[in-house]
Amino acid sequence: MVRLSTFTVGLTLGLILAAGAAFAQTGKVTVVTSFSKDVTDPLKKAFEKAVPGATLEVQNRNTNAGVKFVEETKANNQVDLFWASAPDAFEVLKAKKLLSPYKPKAAGIAEKVGSYPVNDKDGFYSGFAASGYGIMWNERYVKANKLPTPKEWQDLTTAPYFDHVSISAPSRSGTTHLTIETILQGEGWDKGWRTTKEISGNLRQVTDRSFGVPEAVNSGQVGYGIVIDFFAFSSQGAGFPVKFVYPSVTTLVPANVGIVANAPNKAGAEAFIEFLLSPTGQEALLEPTIRRLPVRPETYAKAPADYPNPFKDKNLQGLLTFNAELSESRSAAVDTLFDQLITFQLEPLKAATKALHEVDAALAKKDNAQARALAKEARDLIAVMPITAAQAASPEIRAAFSGGKEKSARQAELEQQWAAFAKEKYAAAKAKADEALKLAR
Amino acid sequence: MRTLAGTRSLGQAALALAIALFLGLFLVVPVTTVIYVAFTEKGGGALTLINFLDFARTELFVRSFWNSVYVSAMTVVWASALALPLAYLTTRFEFRGAMLVQTLGFLPLVMPPFVGAVAMQLLFGRNGSVNLLLDEWFGFKIGFMEGLNGVIFLQAIHYFPFILVNLSAALRNIDRSMEEAAQNLGSHGLRLFRRIALPLALPGYIAGASLVFVKVFDDVATPLLLNVKEMLAPQAYLRITSIGIDDPMGYVISVVLIGVAVATMWASALVLKGKDYATTQRGGGGLARRKLKPRESFLAYAVVILILALVLAPHVGLLLLSFATVWSFSPLPDGYTLAHYARVLGDSSVYIKNTLLYSSLAAGIDIVIGGAIAYLVLRTKLAGRQWLDWAASTALAVPGIVLGIGYLRAFYGVKLPDGTPLATLWIVIVLAIAIRRLPYALRAAYAALQQISVSLEEAAENLGATKARTVRRVVIPLMTGGLLAGFVTSFATAAVELSAVLMLVQSNSDAPLAYGLYVLMQTPAGRGAGAALGVIAVVIVAICMGLAQLAADRSQRVRGLDI
């Protein structure tokens, strides 16, 4: 038996020694990214051509895993750049002092795309591209189920779309978070949540990955998805029978790049950022597999005819000025509210919504004032929020999520309160809607 | 005599210590660095149990807990229903193609991440092939993949090989004289199976069933694929991997998951306690194989083919997907192409090499350690030996991402002489995979050893063999079937492991297949290529398993004749 144990130890040791060590080469720029191969490969090639002697080492991780990785390895950091879409991931890194500031030298970059500022105001990360949100749908699915073609967000709240729509959870997808936040800022807290919940009542599923939505639409498991534009365009490029539309009010969200604190190859990291912002780098974004919106206005001259241009197209200009500080102050609260009121209460919410659609159909045939009043009460019950906008950004609530001293309740307690609140209201709304249905029939 | 006993227990103690050190270094310490958060107050860091109180008071978590219990228990039932006929028919009867059935029946366990999910949606989803056809012909659809029952359906298909492999190994190990004795006393047919074969094979069945229960309880991928979030493991995963929310509850749930895993292993040991499953077989052979009558034979083949068709459907879907041009909302793809294979062929050789290397090393480590733990627990009287078993079993319940983060935390600060962190070496990936798959090998080794009569070892020792020599010449050869089952299970599942790997891969040249697959599956254009890579992974595993089966069969035959 002793032999056995020596064997084990020997095996382990031997393996560790035999593994050898990978030496860092000069000119190697290591980047942690959530972007897919389709995006990184062409840019890697173009970068290595533009900067002779440089090699780009791409570590592909999803955004969450990437943030955790940078955080866990900070003591002995080997990563030069963090490269991803979601601005909130960069906010987290910045707050944890894991980014080092850099002001790009490239000239001719726009200050704003749509309503969103391109660069971090403190210079910790820079936007290099933008993408817009919209609705994609599977044509075969829509045809087989005889469903309408959507144009506006409001369309998604109507009866025909019930059980056919998919979205990713804002707590899981930085870009969805921005979309929800834009609705809240554009329509105000109460009205914005009402819209969000009305759309959510029609949801088929809330996915935990951004890519889960286009995946489900592409394979025809759901009809419509609320997605970022390049998912739809690259799906079309791959031959899937899908269509996409920007609603008249859309949001543009930037994709960012930032230098990690204590980067082993800071010069290389800076070179990569400058490359991304250079005319060559910006033009590479127009490639069909990448299809992001450049932040350099002049680049659009080289774009195909139907390419969206946020600096010219009216619907991409943005109707409001996005308040990044407001967004930041309540981001955990908004994510958690969405999860507790919608994601984890989807069945009760859908049951109430379904009943309301039936009431509407009955009322359209034969009007009934009393039923109409009840249906309105039911809608108000669904829309009501456990906390106000002021509370969401209050120090007490923020501390509950960050673990600060001002907290009035722990995060788990808040979650339970909100979930119980939603459950009760949705059940009451369902009861009212059922009552209305009896009257209307 | 006394000195001999002294060195013996000294050797055993040294072995136990070495294993404890290994588990401590690569499992307990890394995991503890992560989940101690569960016992601290958020923000303050003071030790507290308040988080567990919050867990019990949160309706969502309690609901998730019972959902998980229900799904796991039901999965065991369905998985048993799938595994029993296959195991029984192929080990108990003269059954042509038994080896093929065993190999194919194992494949469902090898489902590549992400792409497997897509393939299953395309077949069984709301608008998958089956439902589209049902709708067209009969005007109704079946919710195979809806809610908790959908999870049970997929998990039963996915995990039933655990029961199949362990039960088959156990059935093969039963002394044929037991059965002959029963037959001589007039027992036959189902009664023979129910009263003799099954009870004697119970250790193997329990090993498989407990693995299925714990795995399903702790699985994240399948529930999330079906968008079922109200189960315990997905709740933990979603919380741990959401950015910017440093919430202890994710880790609290992890602790609960670990508790459930240990409790399950403890309960399964309790079931077998106080009974003797060992038979003094004459060095292999196993149950005598009966001949089937023509009608029975027809029935048997029908059952086997039906089960295989069901459990291999996802792989058929995967194969179709890898050749498909576009497949969307239609029973079959629009067209077929070889382009996806062409695309991955260039990249995949390095992935294949890494996967083979990592998986075989990890599985090798697993069976050495698993076998040693089983021996220490069952054959020695060392104090605290049960703890080794329990500690190793907790690896089942530790979410892959937690292990990954733990490794970064524990080993990234450790620098090699040239300054690169220890955690960037590929061997760390191997160790992580080995730890994650150790429980599979351990359960298999455990079951195998339980079936060997201790009297064989006593006989060897009475004839003057030392303990080490007895182990080498008697115990290990008799355990071969079980150890091989463990190796194969660890190897095959290691080949598609992703969650811990995703955290630890540092460069493309060190990445295994699962990582390459993950990278491809994040784009619409990568779906076909991902499927092609998935098919390659499955084929590699199938070949390796076929070879292992062949080796097992041959060695058993050789020993069986060699009496």
Image (tube, rainbow, N blue to C red):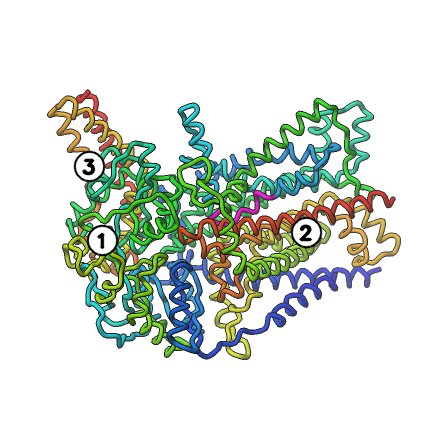
Q: Quadrant of the N terminus of chain A?
A: bottom right
Q: Position of residue A354 (x, y in %)?
A: 26, 31
Using the rendered image of the protein, determine whether residue B330 is visible from the camera's viewpoint. Answer: yes
Q: Chain of mark 3?
A: A
Q: Is residue B368 left or right of residue A288?
A: right
Mark drawn on residue B374: 2
Task: Say the numbered circle drawn on residue A181.
Answer: 1
Tell me the mark number nearer the camera, choosing from 1 and 2.
Answer: 1
Residue pushed farthest left? A369
Q: In which chain is the residue bearing label 2?
A: B
Residue at 70% over, 25% down? B190
Residue ID for mark 3: A381
> Mark 3 against mark 1, which lies toward the viewer?
1
Q: Which chain does tag 1 point to?
A: A
- Amino acid type, mark 3: Leu
Left or right relative to B119: residue B201: right
